[in-house]
Amino acid sequence: MTIADVIKKRDLNKSLLIGYYGGGNFGDELLLEVLLNMLKKQNVHDIDVLYQAFDRYATYHHDFGCRLVAMSHKFELLKAILRNKQLVVGGGGLWGLDVNTSTFALGVVLWVSRWLLGKKIYLLGVGYYNSTSRFGHMSAWLAGKAANHIVVRDAESRGNFKKITSAVTLDKDIAWYTRDLNLDVYAADAKKLEARTSLPQQSGERALFITLRRFKPQYANDFTASVEELIAAAPHKKIIVALLEPRDVDPLGFDLITSWAAKYPQVQAIDFAYNPLTLLLFFKQHNKQLMFVGPQFHGILTAHLAGVPYMPLVYDNKTQELLNQVGVQASYSLYNLSADELQNYVLGEGIA
């Protein structure tokens, strides 16, 4: 059973959608936007969405008529759980390198909702990886025991959840379903992004679209420093450096990329305050003028879906699983990537 099958064959009216929505992270907002499109297409209504910051919603999403539930208000969350018939976890590599206390809390909420409150639980397009912590394994066990059905996005996740429950089927990440969406409705958003960028006009030239990412201290690496060395080594190449989250979420990152834009004339700096499907459409429209370098799972997947060449970077099992799915034979570990390797790939025999 695929994600589409669950949406078509299960009555998902009166559902609470749960994910890391509302923080402005590109990947999480992309998953929600695609899922809401899919639900609307099947005429699923009466939807609540657990969302972190209500004032961000209009920036990252079109209006689908859903109700927002404050993630920080426990009483509102309890009312939403009681009001709805099912809880739907809408995608993401929840049980991986980035697991945190909120992930464990999610496992507890799902278990209680299923076994004490009698709710149906669906996990759609989720990932569970060997790279997660003991805390993550405990959370995944709770979620797996709670779920009526789990649709995983890759083979490693299937193997891990199969140890917990037999109600597991394999599909792909929710973002793959952008292939079934009409992106024309995002054209106005794409024009706004286009207005902020300057792309090569000469045939055969590509601008470099680079995304930076914050890492926990234990996963520190030299990627950001290597990116600046690349910028310094390529004064004639148009380079867009982006954060795939709001500037107020990563003010240090935004200060860094704006300082690069001031220091290096070829650099354009943006934080991503757009509907996430805007980037996909922008990439599709300019796939002959762009190349992508970034560690984010959904940055790589967006580039792949749009036909934009990308460097196969791996920082967690989830990105390696994605590259396995698309048939990439060789990849680069972000933790061992040298500045020379990055420059050679981008400016030499790689994707330039």
Image (cartoon, rainbow, N blue to C red):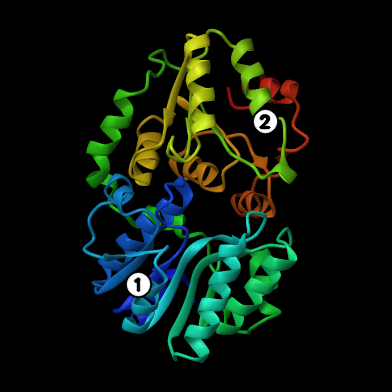
Q: Which of the labelled discs sits on residue 127, or is there none?
A: none
User: In this orientation, which residue lies closer to the viewer: 337 or 46?
Assistant: 46
Q: Is 324 on the left-hand or right-hand side of 276?
A: right
Sequence order check: which comes first, mark 1 or mark 2? 1
- Secondary structure of the residue carrying numbered label 2: helix
Q: Which residue lies at the image location 61% right of the left edge and 52% below the top edge?
A: 322
Closer to the camera, 38 or 276?
A: 276
Residue occupying image coordinates x 40% and y 19%: 199
Number of disc labels: 2
Q: Is residue 164 above or below residue 220?
A: below
Mark 1 residue crowding within 10 angstroms, few (<14) / some (14–19) / many (20+): some
Residue 153 seen in this snapshot: no
Whole-percent x and y of residue 56? Answer: 33, 48
Task: Give the farthest residue toward the right.
Answer: 336
Q: Position of residue 235 (x, y in %)?
A: 56, 8
Q: In the picture shown, does residue 84 fall above or below 282?
A: below
The residue lying toward the viewer, choosing from 208 and 145, is 145
The residue to which callout 1 is attached is 76
Closer mark to the observer between disc 1 and disc 2? 1
Residue 227 locus on image (x, y percent): 63, 23
Q: Which quadrant holds residue 15? A: bottom left
Residue type, label 2: Phe
Q: Position of residue 321 (x, y in %)?
A: 65, 55
Q: On the image, numbered disc 2 is attached to which residue?
A: 223
Specify the quadrant of the image occupied by residue 317: bottom right
- Specify the amino acid type for callout 1: Glu
Q: Are marks 1 and 2 in contact (CB under 8 Å)?
A: no
The correct choice, above or below, for 294 with respect to 33 in the image is above
Residue at 33%, 24% in the rendered image: 196
Q: Which residue is rendered at x = 51% and y = 59% of the image?
A: 173
Which corner quadrant holds the C terminus? top right
